Image (tube, rainbow, N blue to C red):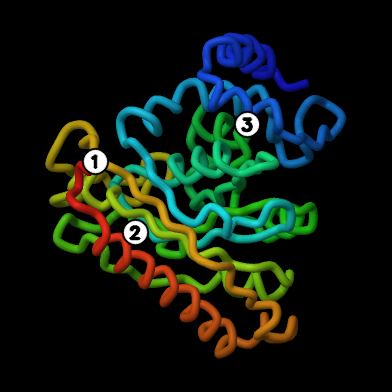
Amino acid sequence: MAADAPFFSRLATVARSRLPEAWRAPLERLRFDDGGEGFDPLGMHPDAIAAGTYLTHWLYDRYFRVVSTGIEHVPTSRPAILASNHSGTIPLDGMMIYLDVLRRTEPTRVLRPILDHFVPGLPFISTFFSRAGALGGSRGNVRFALEHGDLLLIFPEGTAGIGKTIWQRYELQEWRVGHAELAIRHGVPVVPTAVIGAEEQLPQIARLGGIRLFGIPYLPIPLTPIPLPVRYHLYYGPPIELGRRFRPADADDPVAVAEAARLVRDAVAALIARGLREREGIFR
């Protein structure tokens, strides 16, 4: 058993006694594939999920006051990929989607965010992310997760998404195609997902390049010292069954993969447009 297990176990004991019932119930429903040493084969531990929920649920409930629409589109058992827009200078959008799926799916599903290339090299944080279910984006990790029925979260914009300035908000950046290639190759649906609110949480006015500490590509310069208490609105669209539109061999065809990624991008863009029409203000 890893050295960090006792720490998470102690914190999880506190978490399960102090969390509101709305959060305890999903944790009690959580199904876990023990790899033999208290962790699942990819390093996830239910105590870390409970501990992380305890430390962050107040952001979901009280600070960002998350409202979500379309959770019924998230598959209840089969593998799938959630593909979302990305923004906010720091990736709190991923945390809010993770918590929303944890709280609102039944049976409880743990979302496995795919981390950007530099995150696994961050000390301490990377271990916690791994224990909570996040994965480094290697093909082996992703293949194993999908073959074992997991639910993945991918941000096709990558760091370009969270690196947008306030003047670029809700403008989708380069839409990388890896999620589409994976969906075609493994025959899993893609659930288009949109986050409204994160674009305004920590307005970025500039950034300093040339800083490579732990592989981080740049240092952001935000307008405010802490994220603003914007209201998050999450939208999940109907699953796009790329496996039915494309043959498995199309996963090796750049033209087919690009077309598949465009379908997902257009669906996410439509959800963003809907969310912007429906919200009454950035704090409401």
Amino acid at dot 3: Pro
Which numbered dot is residue 150? none
SS label for mark 2: helix
Q: Quadrant of residue 239?
A: bottom right
Q: How many angstroms separate mark 2 from mark 1 (CA)?
A: 18 Å
Which residue lies under the disc numbered 1?
Answer: 230
Position of the N terminus, as image quadrant, is top right
Q: How many angstroms separate mark 3 from mark 1 (CA)?
A: 26 Å
Side (left or right) of 189 relative to 113: right
Side (left or right) of 83 relative to 107: left
Q: Which of 214 and 100 is in front in this view?
A: 100
SS label for mark 1: loop
Q: Which residue is drawn at 63% across and 87% down?
A: 253
Amino acid at dot 1: Val
Of labels 2 and 1, earlier in sequence is 2
Q: Residue at x 56, y 21 (%)?
A: 21
Side (left or right) of 118 relative to 203: right
In this rendering, is residue 272 above or below 92?
Answer: below
In this rendering, is residue 25 above or below 69?
Answer: above
Amino acid at dot 2: Gly
In this rendering, is residue 14 above or below 216?
Answer: above
Q: Which residue is drawn at 51% across and 77% down?
A: 261
Q: Which residue is drawn at 66% across and 14% down?
A: 9
Q: Callout 2 environment at 10 Å: few (<14), some (14 to 19), or many (20+)? A: many
Q: Which of 38 and 269 is in front in this view?
A: 269
Q: How many angstroms separate mark 3 from mark 2 (CA)?
A: 30 Å
SS label for mark 3: helix
Of circles 3 and 2, the one toward us is 3
Which residue lies under the disc numbered 2?
Answer: 161
Which numbered dot is residue 26? 3
In this rendering, is residue 151 above or below 191?
Answer: above
Of labels 3 and 2, earlier in sequence is 3
